Amino acid sequence: GIQVEQSPPDLILQEGANSTLRCNFSDSVNNLQWFHQNPWGQLINLFYIPSGTKQNGRLSATTVATERYSLLYISSSQTTDSGVYFCAVKTGANNLFFGTGTRLTVIP
Amino acid sequence: KAGVTQTPRYLIKTRGQQVTLSCSPISGHRSVSWYQQTPGQGLQFLFEYFSETQRNKGNFPGRFSGRQFSNSRSEMNVSTLELGDSALYLCASSLGTSGGANEQYFGPGTRLTVT
């Protein structure tokens, strides 16, 4: 099946810093989503972005489908941004393949 | 619009028992998918139901099964529980239309502990 790799696996930031999370995938996709998993385990939708660029407040994402990668940008990070960020992709069937996640810790 | 709901939120079972988890999708969504999350294997797809039919299945043993009702609510069942089945089980809801966007929305999960 398709391989999804996320980097870095762990990231520690000072509050107010910016960060870039990367997601590489091994095959063509027709859906790509970014999620934030909160401490209670729920996956919160951040972006649905199979291609192009989107922004939502301090977060933005870019997917370059032809080069098989996506980037999630977090600006002016806050302690509430801490958690695990997952990239997930979909090919033909309606199921998501998840990366292993990036664990972000924001220190006050 | 109400989100995806899952019940129960927490469950403790003994090896050999069986368990049933429930998921109610977002109103109007016809596809329900189930995922298992463990520290060792990460997030893995179990199966997808659409219009009461299993449309897609991941690589899990037959002890894992599911069904979907006419109102799109879904249940998954795990029989003969093993210690390795301890996990967070997540349900996702989407429109499920062929070739459509099908953005998936997740419920809060059921945390199953097998002792």
Image: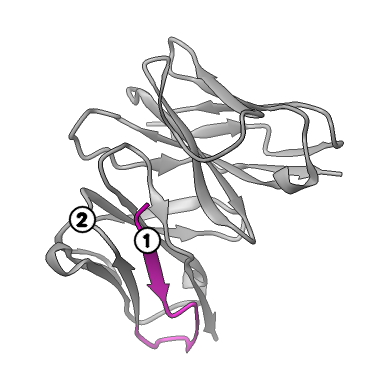
Q: Position of residue B7 (x, y in %)?
A: 64, 30
Q: In the image, which residues are magenta? A: A1-19
Secondary structure under badge 2?
Answer: loop
> Where does the image place residue B53, in percent across and percent down from the top left?
41, 17
**Where on the picture, by quarter, is residue B50?**
top left
- The residue identified by callout 2 is A28
Q: Residues within 10 Å of mark 1 (few under 14, many from 20)?
A: few
**Chain containing mark 2:** A
Q: Quarter-wise, where is residue A19 in the image?
A: bottom left
Residue A81 lies, in percent from the top left, at: 46, 71
- Which chain does the numbered disc 1 sit on? A
Q: Residue at x 29, y 42 (%)?
A: B103
Going by the image, does A32 lie left or right of A78?
left
Crowd tier of the residue under label 2, counting other residues whose Cα lies within 10 Å: few below 14, some 14–19, many 20 or above: some
Q: Residue type at mark 1: give it.
A: Gln
Residue occupying image coordinates x 29% and y 29%? B95
User: What amino acid is found at the position of numbered circle 2 in the picture?
Assistant: Ser
Residue wearing tag 1: A3
